[in-house]
Image (cartoon, grey):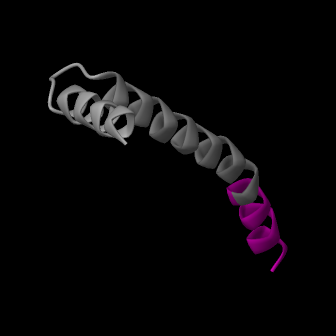
Amino acid sequence: MSNLQTKLELWIADVNQEDSNTLKLFAKITDTMFSMIKWAGIPFVLYLLIEAARW
């Protein structure tokens, strides 16, 4: 139990830092998700434009 409490305290101390590893990890995850959405959305928008041009 004390091992878990120690890890939790270290994680809380890490989150409270300006350049914490946790914040860097979450920033990388959100950047990757945005990039995937952006690149997956471009073909979809092109498809919508092509379908709208057919009308």
Q: Is residue 30 left or right of residue 8?
A: right
Q: In which image quadrant can residue 27 be found? A: top left
Q: Is residue 34 above or below residue 54?
A: above
Q: Is residue 17 above or below residue 40?
A: above
Q: Residue furthest front?
A: 1
Q: Is residue 6 left or right of residue 52?
A: left
Q: Is residue 9 above or below residue 47?
A: above
Q: Residue furthest bottom?
A: 55
Q: Is residue 55 left or right of residue 27?
A: right
In the foreground, 8 or 28:
8
Q: Is residue 5 magenta?
A: no
Q: Quadrant of the C terminus?
A: bottom right
In the foreground, 13 or 24:
13
Tell me where the magenta segment starts and ends, as one range.
45-55
Query: Which residue lies at the image location 67% right of the left edge and 41% below the top edge?
Result: 39
Residue 38 location, x and y as percent?
Answer: 59, 45
Q: Quadrant of the N terminus?
A: top left
